[in-house]
Image (spheres, coloured by chain):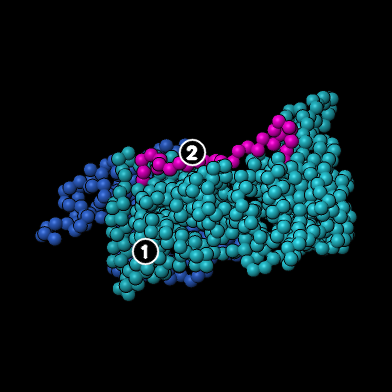
Chain colours: A cyan, B blue
């Protein structure tokens, strides 16, 4: 028989989930035929399980407080959750449901009521009164007893100020694609030229399909008619219609009038209609929570691949047979076909996103952070010049872009790529305005309202109109570099991804910056643009403004070149309205010549012969 | 309510379980059945799977459940736990070669011990919850990190700035306090 101290140590390791295989054998021996040890073991097992249940229920409650706070719902009533019994997770899986087991709302409602009765029976009278009060409070706060349509109407009438939307100065999502037939709700096009959204913004479509990407990495495809309100980089509110969502490896939260859907890294469809919220899982698994229960950490239901569930207007769940009748679209973005018939890659697509083979309508990179989801050009109440930290900032999320920077004001040496190439740039103001941006020309640009909706972003009252005009005439689109700013493209990564040599950089260069004075006279400003290849100056155009017109840039490249850097500076120490643009900027590609590696050749040559994709070290 | 009628939604004597009552009973006693399964399972990470298969099995056998007790809850939990025990054994049979686990005899003995004292264990779970609620914030945080988030003890120690050994001792103190608290509560209820 095992020593008493040994058994105690084994039981503690069991509670800690740290039993080795030898421990299991020893514990099994100690348990066999010894009721006293078995009793101790069972007590230890219940201790472990009890702590787990408690911790999960508390964790869930904390999580829901965060979510509720994010979407503007008040905190749950503490007193009412004190009596919950901790069994917050119920598991429903497609492959585990009996074929004839379709839980009606009545079933689960009855179960919930019975569960409440059990909890209430063990709770003191004072707590009971508070619990009942809190229960009614939660139901009214979440619209649990409100019909879906009413709840939707309530959401729509909520002003932005009513919502506890955090970090309202940030960009949390961007429109990445829309079909040509898209018609915006209320005739209102997205207000931002770069199709970005801040917390509280609403995107609604009456026809067509639109796709948005969140700063947290999730993507939603809206199928018309649909309306989505953006609440954060990893959360949104679906007010009507249907969406398809994908959040690889991210926790994305979608709130509807009756449910909260938590995507834990999968693909799903959610539809909101008069019957409530329908959820379908295409891949992986999601968690669905009825808003009616969210205050007390009520059951979180796992919905697995191939399964559909409805949370009706009363917040009651039903497992659905088959897929709900919503026109889900699982992916809208089309491959950019970067080489196309002309064998070129557009810099617009390189700036536009981290997925090189997709064509986004718009893209942007903040020159201070290297990230697209950074604050926009203006804060809530004032314009904001961007001052750099004199550092080159890498953009690891975008493998085709090496990094970005705001040049130093004092004309000292500046690092312009991750290989450490240093260059001397002229004295400048040392600040920039807004992100480096890319816009593909789109049908949206023909919308008059859209063309005048962005003045608050301080493009300069004449700039935006000029950009729109130029976009309509562009073959691909426009890349914007408002002085003072620099961006470096990784030619090596592009070459590897395309399995081709990058042989030429071409674009049309213009300064579209212009601002109207009080009398409506357009004022222009001069700027410089320099092009470096691996730290060597290959092209420059200095002191040019809008009246100087467009110039053609052609820079020859060789397969050994690694970095292409574009730098826009203010020329005269004043960066205002120095809006340098590159129209239809492309890299021309050429198939690599066949390699003939000699005996004893190096690894790079062998790898290319074997058609291996090399990842170049940074 | 006419004399002799069971309360609304309750199981009638000698009648089969209907799906609504079945679901209601499962939801009500899910925690107890899960605790039962968890006590028989190594590793505990597969408890969810076994609980689901047990639910399915119980649902298929729903019409076999007979009971004259009112309410039928305790009889249902005993019946459900018996089904769960067989699901655990089936689980072990399928995976016996992959993992070192308890022997069939030990599983049977532990299961039997619990099925004969489900009432007491239910009180134990309720008492434990009250005892955890009465802990200080730091102790609760430890429980959340270890048992809610599943963070290994060594990682918690690193985050808090303690040695791993110190963290094990801290957790042991928390558990000892809980066991003592539970014991006192059960004794007060005449169940100790």
Residue situated furthest left in the rendering:
B3
Q: Chain of mark 1?
A: A
Tag count? 2
Q: Is residue A388 visible?
A: no
Q: Which mark is residue B98?
A: 2
Q: Are marks 1 and 2 in contact (CB under 8 Å)?
A: no
In the foreground, A295 or A177:
A177
Give the overall secondary structure of the magenta segment.
loop
**Occupied quadrant, residue A170:** bottom right
* Residue under the point 73% across and 28% down: A610
Residue positioned most to the bottom: A126
Image spot of residue A222 (x, y percent): 51, 47
Q: Residues within 10 Å of mark 2 (few under 14, many from 20)?
A: few
The nearer-to-camera label among 1 and 2 is 1
Badges 1 and 2, same chain:
no
**What range is drawn magenta here?**
A319-346
Label 1's element? helix
Residue A544 visible to an observer of this rendering: yes
Above or below for B26 versus B53: below
Q: Which mark is residue B116?
A: none
Give the structural element (helix, strand or loop) at label 2.
loop
Disc 2 sits on a residue from what chain? B
Residue at 22% across, 55% down: B9
The residue lying at 49 percent from left, 67 percent from top is A162
The x, y position of residue B21, in whole percent, is 25, 51
Q: In this rendering, would A400 be left or right of A301? A: right
Q: Which residue is mark 1?
A: A139
State the residue in front, B1 or A364: A364
Please state which of residues A602 and A299 is positioned toward the viewer in this rendering. Answer: A299
């Amino acid at each position: 028989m095992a020593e008493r101290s040994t058994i105690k140590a084994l039981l503690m390791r069991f509670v800690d989930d740290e039993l080795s295989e030898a421990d299991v054998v020893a514990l099994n021996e100690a348990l066999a035929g010894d009721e006293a040890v078995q009793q101790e073991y069972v007590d230890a097992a219940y201790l472990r399980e009890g702590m787990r249940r408690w911790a999960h229920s508390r964790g869930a409650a904390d999580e829901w407080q965060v979510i509720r706070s994010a979407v503007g719902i008040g905190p749950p009533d503490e007193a009412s959750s004190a009596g919950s019994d901790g069994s917050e997770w119920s598991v429903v899986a497609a492959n585990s449901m009996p074929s004839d087991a379709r839980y009606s709302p009545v079933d689960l409602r009855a179960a919930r009521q019975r569960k409440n009765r059990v909890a209430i029976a063990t709770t003191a009278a004072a707590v009971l009164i508070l619990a009942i009060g809190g229960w009614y409070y939660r139901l009214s706060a979440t619209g649990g007893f409100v019909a879906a349509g009413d709840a939707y109407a309530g959401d729509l009438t909520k002003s932005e100020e009513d919502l506890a939307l955090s970090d309202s100065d940030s960009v949390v999502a961007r429109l990445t694609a829309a079909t040509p037939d898209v018609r915006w709700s209320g005739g209102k096009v997205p207000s931002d030229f770069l199709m970005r959204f801040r917390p509280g913004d609403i995107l609604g479509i009456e026809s067509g399909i639109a796709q948005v990407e969140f700063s947290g990495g999730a993507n939603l495809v809206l199928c018309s008619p649909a309306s989505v309100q953006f609440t954060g980089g990893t959360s949104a509110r679906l007010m009507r219609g249907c969406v398809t969502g994908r959040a690889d490896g991210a926790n994305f939260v979608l709130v509807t009038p009756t449910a909260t859907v938590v995507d834990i890294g999968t693909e799903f469809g959610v539809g909101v209609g008069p019957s409530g919220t329908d959820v379908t899982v295409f891949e992986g698994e999601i968690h669905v929570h009825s808003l009616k229960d969210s205050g007390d950490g009520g059951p979180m239901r796992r919905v697995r691949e191939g399964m559909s569930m409805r949370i009706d207007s009363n917040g009651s769940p039903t497992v659905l047979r088959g897929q709900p009748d919503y026109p889900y679209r699982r992916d809208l973005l089309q491959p950019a076909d970067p080489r196309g018939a002309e064998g070129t890659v557009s810099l617009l697509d390189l700036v536009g996103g981290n997925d090189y083979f997709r064509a986004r309508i718009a893209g942007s990179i903040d020159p201070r952070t290297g990230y697209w989801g950074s604050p926009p050009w203006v804060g809530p109440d004032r314009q904001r010049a961007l001052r750099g930290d004199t550092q080159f900032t890498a953009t690891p999320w975008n493998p085709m872009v090496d990094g970005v920077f705001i040049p130093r004001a004092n004309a000292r040496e500046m690092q312009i790529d991750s290989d450490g190439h240093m260059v001397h740039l002229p004295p400048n103001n040392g600040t920039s305005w807004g992100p480096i941006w890319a816009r593909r020309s789109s049908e949206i640009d023909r919308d008059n309202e859209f063309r005048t909706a962005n003045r608050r972003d301080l493009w300069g009252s004449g700039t935006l109109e000029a950009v729109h005009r130029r976009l309509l005439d562009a073959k691909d689109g426009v890349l914007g570099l408002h002085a003072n700013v620099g961006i470096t493209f990784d030619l090596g990564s592009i070459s590897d991804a395309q399995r081709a040599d990058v042989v030429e950089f071409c674009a049309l260069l213009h300064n579209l910056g212009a601002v109207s004075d009080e009398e409506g006279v357009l004022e222009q400003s001069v700027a410089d643009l320099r092009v470096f290849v691996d730290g060597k100056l290959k092209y420059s155009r200095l002191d040019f403004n809008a009246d100087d017109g467009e110039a053609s840039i052609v820079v020859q490249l060789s397969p050994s070149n690694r970095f292409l850097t574009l730098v826009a500076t203010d020329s005269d120490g004043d960066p205002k309205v120095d809006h340098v643009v590159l129209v239809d900027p492309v890299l021309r590609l050429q198939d690599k010549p066949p390699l003939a590696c000699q005996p004893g050749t190096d690894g790079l040559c062998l790898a290319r012969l074997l058609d291996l994709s090399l990842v170049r070290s940074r | 309510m006419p004399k002799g009628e069971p309360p609304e939604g309750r199981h009638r004597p000698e009648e089969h379980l209907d799906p609504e009552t079945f679901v209601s009973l499962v939801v009500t006693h899910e925690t107890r059945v899960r605790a039962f399964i968890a006590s028989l399972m190594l590793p505990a990470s597969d408890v969810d799977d076994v609980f689901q298969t047990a639910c399915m099995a119980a649902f298929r056998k729903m019409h076999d459940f007979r009971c004259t007790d009112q309410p039928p809850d305790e009889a249902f939990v005993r019946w459900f736990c018996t089904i769960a025990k067989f699901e655990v054994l089936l689980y072990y049979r399928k995976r016996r070669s992959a993992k070192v686990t308890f022997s069939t005899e030990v599983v049977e003995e532990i299961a039997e011990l619990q099925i004969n004292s489900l009432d007491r264990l239910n009180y134990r779970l309720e008492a434990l919850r009250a005892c955890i609620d009465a802990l200080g914030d730091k102790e609760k945080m430890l429980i959340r990190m270890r048992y809610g988030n599943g963070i290994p003890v060594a990682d918690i120690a690193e985050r808090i700035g303690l040695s791993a050994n110190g963290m094990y001792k801290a957790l042991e103190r928390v558990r000892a306090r809980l066991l003592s608290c539970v014991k006192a509560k059960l004794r007060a209820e005449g169940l100790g």
